[in-house]
């Protein structure tokens, strides 16, 4: 029994020490606060060298930048411009001459089919540097580029472009009701046949495909400024 009582006392003492330690930790951390720094204060801050950043963005591509899409309906980008409808006979105009589309028509969409692309930014150097403007030194963020590591563009674009119109039932001519309403951008895919350039690609009247390297040199400096700067 004495042994158990002794262990209980040690456990209680350990918990008391832990609680006191936590209290001191909370008390010490509450003394810290964020303070703003002006340009002069920033110049007095020292640190390590900058960092090299890289970023690779890939859309509907495999590891070799080849088009990869399991369902062509969901590899599209569609735009509906100015509420354009297929029937404009019921449109009206306000006092300023602006057209007010009538909801009697069905929306038309500009659909980019087979959208894809890979952009690889191999290296951007992030550093800090002072900028002198009107005799005043400003702390600036410096972004540098390596001309031997260009930005790579691989198969960036879309396979075909077309104008698609919503499909609706007779009871919902403006696609607001009905059970068979289908947005134009979800029009079933109709690929070309054969074995030519357009084989197995969706029907459309134009396509864009870009491959190349963009080599940049120089740097960009970003700094804060006051009312003395003409663009602030």
Image (cartoon, rainbow, N blue to C red):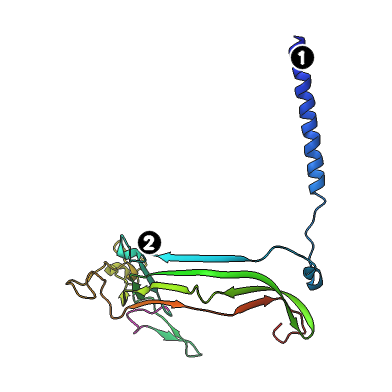
Answer with left or right where residue 127 lies relative to residue 168: right
Residue position for label 2:
63
Local secondary structure at mark 2: loop
Q: Which residues are magenta?
A: 83-90
Relative height, residue 47 to residue 6 (above, below): below
Query: Furthest-front residue in view?
Result: 148
Residue 143: image location, x then y, percent: 61, 73
In what quadrant of the picture does the N terminus appear?
Answer: top right
Relative height, residue 182 to residue 203 (above, below): above
Front-lying residue, 21 or 211: 211
Relative height, residue 5 to residue 45 (above, below): above
Residue position for label 1:
5
Residue 66: image location, x then y, percent: 33, 66
Answer with left or right where residue 76 lies relative to residue 26: left
- What's the residue at 42%, 65% (across, down)? 58
Q: Magenta segment: does it hold 85?
A: yes
Answer with left or right where residue 219 lies relative to residue 48: left
Residue 101: image location, x then y, percent: 41, 81
Front-lying residue, 125 or 24: 125
Local secondary structure at mark 1: helix
- What's the residue at 54%, 74% (across, down)? 146
Structural distance between the alpha carbons of marks 1 and 2: 66 Å
Query: Furthest-left residue in view?
Result: 194
Residue 5: image location, x then y, percent: 77, 14
Is residue 181 visible in this depiction of the protein?
Answer: no
- What's the residue at 52%, 77% (across, down)? 147
In what quadrant of the picture does the C terminus appear?
Answer: bottom right
């Amino acid at each position: 029994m004495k042994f158990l009582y002794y262990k209980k006392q040690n456990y209680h003492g350990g918990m008391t020490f832990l609680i006191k330690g936590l209290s001191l930790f909370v008390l010490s951390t509450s003394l810290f606060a964020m303070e703003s720094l002006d340009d002069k204060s920033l110049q007095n801050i020292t640190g390590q060298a900058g960092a090299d950043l890289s970023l690779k963005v890939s859309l509907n591509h495999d590891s070799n930048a080849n088009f990869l899409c399991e369902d062509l309906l969901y590899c599209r980008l569609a735009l509906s411009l100015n509420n354009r409808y297929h029937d404009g006979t019921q449109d009206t105009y306000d006092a300023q001459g602006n057209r007010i589309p009538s909801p009697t028509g069905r929306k038309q969409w500009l659909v980019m089919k087979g959208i894809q692309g890979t952009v690889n930014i191999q290296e951007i150097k992030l550093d800090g540097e002072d900028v002198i403007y009107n005799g005043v030194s400003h702390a600036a963020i410096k972004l540098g580029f390596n001309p031997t590591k260009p930005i790579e563009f691989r198969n960036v674009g879309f396979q075909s472009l077309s104008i698609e119109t919503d499909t609706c039932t007779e009871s919902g001519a403006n696609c607001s009701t009905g059970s068979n309403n289908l947005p134009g951008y979800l029009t079933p895919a109709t690929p070309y046949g054969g074995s030519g350039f357009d084989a197995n690609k969706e029907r459309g009247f134009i396509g864009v495909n870009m491959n190349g390297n963009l080599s940049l040199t120089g740097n960009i400096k970003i700094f804060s400024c006051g009312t003395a700067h003409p663009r602030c």
